[in-house]
Amino acid sequence: MLQQAWSDELDAKRIVDTYGNMLFSICLVILCNEKDAEDAVQDTFITYLTKSPTFNDPEHEKAWLITIATNRCKNMRRYNFIRKHIDINDLQLYSKNDKNHDLLDHLMRLPTKHKVVLLLYYVEGYKVDEIAKILTITTSAVKKRLQRGRELLRERYRKENEYGF
Amino acid sequence: MDFEKIKDAVTSIEMSKAMEDRIKKNIGKKKSIQVNYIRWISVACAFGILLSIMIGMPYLNKNGEIQVANFAITAYALSDDGKQFNTAITSEKATIELATEDRVGALLSISGSGANLIFTDVRLKITGEQIESITYTLSEGKFIEDVTFTSKEYVDKEWLRSEKINFITTEPGSGKYQGIKEVGSTYTVNYNEQEKHKYALAIPHDGNEVIGDDMIIKVNVKYTDGNSEQQDIVVTQESNSISLRLN
């Protein structure tokens, strides 16, 4: 029993060290609330530890965690749609580079379905067909969301920053 | 617009050390609880099954059937050869031949509504522990008692009415008088005095000795500790016999 508890503790430490920041950044951008993001990450890891799924390779493991986390975020948004949006000034608590704060703020204000696709494509580097599998949607839907997400981001950013990127 | 900057912006987000430690602690704790929970489910199930068996054992009667109360009911009657027999009342039908021939032949109605009653010699007795009293209640019909009296009492109609002796059977020339005393649709008897009160069943019929819908006898037992239990007996007619079974 003690050996099992020790093994669990090691497993918990490993996945938090490996995937903690990656999942937290995704969840924070989707949920725009640090407490909810923490809960979503924690729930994802608990699901991982209790279900103990088997993976073919680390990429498989990562994709599985992202799927669980994004689904958890979507559910949380569905049932708790009124929430305190993270203030741009609070972003410095989580992102040390001030230059990124404006972009993060604009990204967070996008509709969830668009920002999830942008995150998976630009941040995690997944291809369109891989995103389609993770989100269980068609590749054409992924392409449309990518395109619309880029347009919205460009448009919103342009409105506030006349110089653009 | 350089969308590749999204990666730099998002990957710059990091959890605080306090948050990271909190998550590690919480998920480790929840995992341990989950493991123990699953383990304890099995233990709880095993314990539950054992408890069910222990609780259920006293509720099995000698035939291995589920007994719903802590007392047993036995029906007594006279068989065709005049010998008394008894049968335990269970959820299975106990069929008892009606022994009404001697009484009905010379039945004299004094008064009352007994014209449509089948007088049986079926009696009930309860056995159990720590029982103080038993109350029987009929949904239809009456409890009756066979009584004997003298010729002097026989002519005293007021006395017969006060004693609720509504039916008299006579044995011509014997000088002995027997009557059927109406006890009522309910009566209570002390457990230790059951032998003193030999009350039998009188079942209503439609005029052609066919009894109506199922008749219920409620048997309520009061224990010495103040608790009580009840079992219901269903009485049905089958040809020239009646069947008793627990409801």
Image (cartoon, rainbow, N blue to C red):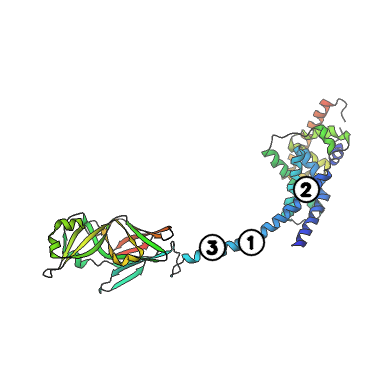
Picture coordinates of residue A64, whole percent (x, y): 76, 50
Please tell me whether mark 3 or mark 1 is closer to you in this view.
3
Q: Quadrant of residue B33?
A: bottom right
Find disc 2 in the rendering and name its residue.
B23
Query: Which three-letter amino acid code belongs to the residue tagged 2?
Result: Ile
CB atoms of marks 3 and 2 within 8 Å:
no
Quick check: do tags 1 and 2 share a chain? yes
Picture coordinates of residue A157, whole percent (x, y): 82, 29
Disc sitting over residue B42 in the figure:
1
> Mark 3: which secondary structure?
helix
The crowding category of the residue bearing disc 2, from other C-alpha atoms within 10 Å (few below 14, some 14 to 19, many at least 20), is many
Q: Quadrant of residue B67?
A: bottom left
CB atoms of marks 3 and 1 within 8 Å:
no
Say whether residue B157 is left or right of residue B1. left
> Mark 2: which secondary structure?
helix
The crowding category of the residue bearing disc 1, from other C-alpha atoms within 10 Å (few below 14, some 14 to 19, many at least 20), is few
CB atoms of marks 1 and 2 within 8 Å:
no
* A55 and B101: which is toward the camera: B101
Q: Which residue is pictured at 87% across the width and 39% down the height?
A: B8
Picture coordinates of residue A86, whole percent (x, y): 78, 34
Q: Distance between the residues labelled 3 and 1?
A: 15 Å
Query: Which three-letter amino acid code belongs to the residue tagged 1?
Result: Ser
Q: Mark 3 or mark 2: which comes first in sequence?
A: 2
Find disc 3 in the rendering and name its residue.
B52
Q: Identify the image quadrant of the C terminus of chain B.
A: bottom left
Q: How far apart are marks 1 and 2 (CA)?
A: 29 Å
* A70 and B195: which is toward the camera: B195
Q: Please tell me whether residue B247 is drawn above or below residue B4 in the rendered image.
A: below
